[in-house]
């Protein structure tokens, strides 16, 4: 058997890193439509794009730090109340 906790429901059709980063970014964009606060880890390669998205959608970053795992960063952000 093995550890099945990190398998995809449907494997990516494209194995390129850019595709994976795009999927991560798209999932975050969808989450931002429905959640008020997000605390999560994301790929370091997406950091600039994510911070731009946060700014453009009017969210506030509470913390943004390197994660303990190389290549990842941790971010805590919240939707601005109007």
Image: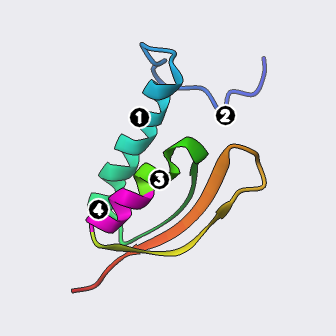
Q: Is residue 39 magenta?
A: no
- The answer to whether residue 18 is left or right of residue 79 is right
In magenta segment, residue 56: yes
Quarter of the image holding residue 4?
top right
Report how far apart the C-alphas of labels 3 and 2 lie in the structure: 29 Å
- Image quadrant holding the N terminus, namely top right
Closer to the chain start, of discs 3 and 2, is 2
Q: Mark 4 points at which residue?
A: 34
Sequence-first disc among 3 and 4: 4
Question: What element does badge 4 sit on?
Answer: helix
| Residue that appears at 47% across and 35% down | 21
Q: Is residue 2 left or right of residue 54?
A: right
Q: Which of marks 1 and 4 is nearer the N terminus?
A: 1
Q: Give the range drawn in magenta.
A: 51-57
Provide the secondary structure element on which disc 2 rests: loop
- Label 3 sits on residue: 48
Q: What's the distance in space between the residues labelled 4 and 2, CA to CA?
A: 25 Å
Numbered-mark total: 4
Classify mark 2: residues with Cα within 10 Å, few (<14), some (14-19) or many (20+).
few
Q: Name the residue under label 1.
A: 23
């Amino acid at each position: 058997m093995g550890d099945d906790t990190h398998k995809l429901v449907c494997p990516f059709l494209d194995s390129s890193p850019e595709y994976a980063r795009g999927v991560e970014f798209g999932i975050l964009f969808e989450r931002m439509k429905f959640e008020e606060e997000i605390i999560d880890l994301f790929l370091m390669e997406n950091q600039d794009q994510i911070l731009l998205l946060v700014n453009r959608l009017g969210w506030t970053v509470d913390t943004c730090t390197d994660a303990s795992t190389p290549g990842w960063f941790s971010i805590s952000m919240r939707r601005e109340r109007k």
